[in-house]
Image: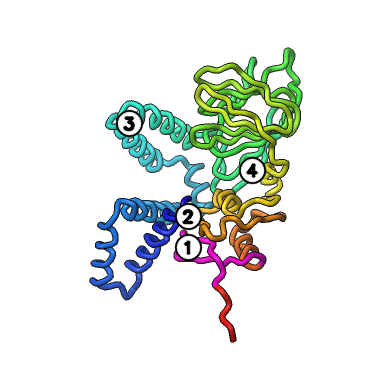
Amino acid sequence: MPPADYAILQEAAEWFAVLRADDAGPADQQAWERWHASSSAHRAAWRRVEAVSAEFRQVPAQPAREALDAAGSREAQARRRAVVKGLLALCLTTGTGGAVLLRRDTRSWVASLNAGEKTAVGAIRQLALADGSQLWLNTATALDLDYGPGLRRIALHGGEIYIATARDSQQPARPLVVDTVHGRLRALGTRFSVQPQGAATLLAVYEGSVEVAPRDGGAPRIVPAGRQVRFGDGFIGEPFAADPNGAAWIEYRLQPEQMRLDDFLAQLSRYRRGHLGCAPEVAHLRLVGSYPLADTDRILAALEATLPVKINRLHDWWVTVEAQPPQSKQ
């Protein structure tokens, strides 16, 4: 995030706190209105803060969410249908290019809601598949398993997975494939991870090799162990070195090796709800170590104890890592 965006977002979050304080008065409201009206960037930042607040407060506790998902109540289904109708209506009112992208994102989002296997934000699961393969689901992941007579298929709707494949017991052996919105991956006796990332999917191969076939054309490519690649509609990027610690999350930890602080916090933010920002003046700091994912607040406390940073909590759902203020001379 550019420095100006960070500063404006912080202003918006601070205004949010001011307006909701017990002692907020008309003067505060009028000052906020002047700030809000003075810039389109201010208005965009305010919408972002409101959206994060609403998302954070509407999510029930995890046990309650799991119970609701399991129950599949008529009320929950009705709410989902209403949201889907709203999204489809939005598709019809956008321009052609935007509608295509939105329809694709909407399909993926709807599939995620109804996925057979999923994890909540901050949760990691390991599954033993019918063929003996092992599958890990990272935070906020949704997928469907479709093992048929001629194909072993994993449809990944969102999030991230790690697969350690096993030899198929059936003869002839069925191919094992992973489908994302961007194309199909075919395992060639391997361990690999897959993560859709906006306009592309990231594949990292740790053992064996994987064939990549983009959805909208382009020649397939085989990616060997130790390499990773991004692919999207009709393209496959140039392979580059895979991070050997990139799959440390299957052991419930993050393991940066000279990673920039802003990149580390971007990874950490996937495991907690709300906003986790990094001030530009400390973004360059480097991290080495192993950080257990069981408690992201403990990770933030460890950063504060080992780096020249402080944790600023404007709200439960808006946290930033900033520079430690200089010590005053006695």
Number of the label disc, if any, that sits on residue 91: 3
User: Which sits earlier in the primary sequence, circle 4 or circle 2?
Assistant: 4
Whole-angstrom CA distance, mark 4 to mark 2, is: 22 Å
Helix or strand or loop: what does disc 1 sit on? loop
Q: Earlier in the sequence, mark 1 or mark 2?
A: 2
* Nearer the observer, 7 or 29: 7
Residues 96 and 238: in front is 238
Please report the residue visible at 70 percent of the width from the left and 50 percent of the height from the top. 257
Q: Disc 1 residue type?
A: Asp
Instruction: Check disc 4 and give the amino acid type.
Output: Arg
Q: For marks 4 and 1, give the CA distance.
A: 26 Å
Question: Are the residues flagged by discs 1 and 3 in contact, CB closer than 8 Å?
Answer: no
Compared with 135, 1 (above or below) is below
314 up-or-down from 269: above or below: below
Q: Earlier in the sequence, mark 3 or mark 4?
A: 3
Q: Where is 151 relative to 24, above or below?
A: above
Tell me which residue sits at (47%, 63%) in the image.
316
Image coordinates for residue 174, horizontal then vertical, percent: 68, 17
Three-letter code, disc 2? Gly
Which quarter of the picture shows residue 304?
Answer: bottom right
Q: Which residues are magenta?
A: 306-325
Q: Residue furthest toward the bottom?
A: 330
- Quarter holding the C terminus? bottom right
Instruction: State the residue at coordinates (72%, 16%).
Output: 173
Q: Is residue 245 above or below residue 212?
A: below
What residue does disc 1 label? 316
For discs 3 and 4, the disc positioned in front in the rendered view: 3
Which mark, by number, is residue 125?
4
Query: Which percent across, then down, holds residue 21?
Result: 35, 71
Label 2 CA crowd tier, 10 Å (few <14, some 14–19, many 20+): many
